[in-house]
Image (spheres, rainbow, N blue to C red):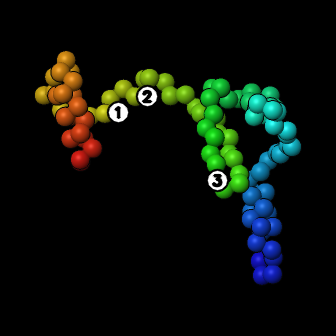
Amino acid sequence: MKGLYLPLAAFLVGLKEMVEAQVKEVDPQGRISIPIEWRKNWKSRKLVLIKRGKRIEVVPVEPTPPSNLFDSIKISEKVDFADPHSLKKALFELEER
């Protein structure tokens, strides 16, 4: 891309991933409207807003069913779950591994 203006090159690279774009106005309370066609397959109404320089990315959060978390943390069988200090100590030991 010799001689191509750098911001234009970045925009063209971004177009590869862009499927659809719309221009929206922000209302006085800072809200924007996301088209229903874009939201219809989202499984949650929660979003993550990521600020990258002058850009803001809006990413839907996919909910995690509690069953996916079953057995996701391996803790020693010697831990007394009724004692919060024992549980806290076991969790700190996991971080050290």
Query: Element under label 1?
Result: loop
Q: Amino acid at mark 3?
A: Arg
The answer to whether the residues at label 1 and label 2 have Cβ atoms under 8 Å apart is yes
- Tag shown at residue 35: none
Q: Position of residue 23 (x, y in %)?
A: 86, 43
Question: Residue 15's spot in the image, x, y percent?
Answer: 79, 57
- Provide the residue designation for mark 3: 52
Q: CA distance from mark 3 to mark 2?
A: 31 Å
Q: Quadrant of residue 48?
A: top right
Q: Residues within 10 Å of mark 1 (few under 14, many from 20)?
A: few
What residue would you read off at disc 1? Answer: 72
Separation of residues labelled 1 and 3 (CA atoms): 32 Å
At a point 13% along the width and 28% down the height, the residue shown is 78
Name the amino acid type tagged 2.
Asn
Point out residue 52 in the picture as x, y percentages from the top left corner: 64, 53
- Please tell me which residue is depicted at 17% across the width and 28% down the height of the picture: 86
Q: Is residue 22 visible?
A: yes
Amino acid type, mark 1: Ser
Q: In the image, is 95 to the left or to the right of 29?
A: left
- 81 left or right of 7? left
**Quarter of the N terminus within the rendering:** bottom right
Residue displayed at 69% across by 47% down: 56
Q: Which residue is mark 2?
A: 68
Q: Helix or strand or loop: what does disc 3 sit on?
A: strand
Q: Is residue 18 above or below residue 26?
A: below
Q: CA distance from mark 1 to mark 2?
A: 8 Å
Q: Are marks 3 and 2 in contact (CB under 8 Å)?
A: no
Compared across the picture, whether 81 is left or right of 60 comes to left
